[in-house]
Image: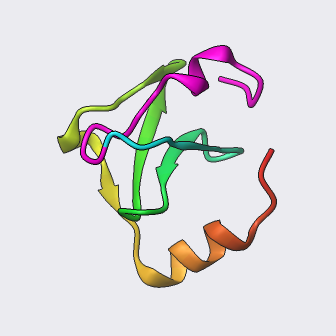
Amino acid sequence: MTPDDPILKILACPLDKGPLTLLLPEDVLYNPRLRRRYPIVDGVPQLLPSSGERVPDEEHERLTKRPTP
């Protein structure tokens, strides 16, 4: 998945239905509102609620301060 992939405009967090941010090179989708990240496996976003991983406070700060692709 790339930052200009059109599917990014329609993907949403399965929990709050809000937009997700693509994080590279980690290749994950991130919801900063809920501090949850969702993996992308073989180019396919894993957007089941159970696939999301809670991000610790320190990691959230690091992710939100970095430039977006």
Instruction: Report which quarter residue 4 is drawn in.
Output: top right
The image shows residue 20 at horizontal and vertical percentages of 51, 42
Image quadrant where one finds the N terminus: top right
Identify the residue at image location x=49%, y=41%.
19
Compared to residue 23, the image places residue 40 above or below, namely above
Q: Which residues are magenta?
A: 1-16
The image shows residue 34 at horizontal and vertical percentages of 35, 62
Identify the residue at image location x=23%, y=33%.
48
Compared to residue 27, the image places residue 7 above or below, namely above
Question: Going by the image, does 33 lie left or right of 52?
Answer: right
The image shows residue 63 at horizontal and vertical percentages of 63, 67
Residue 10 inside the magenta-drawn segment: yes
Identify the residue at image location x=53%, y=75%.
59
Compared to residue 35, the image places residue 57 above or below, namely below
Image quadrant where one finds the C terminus: top right
Question: What secondary structure is the magenta-colored segment mainly?
Answer: loop
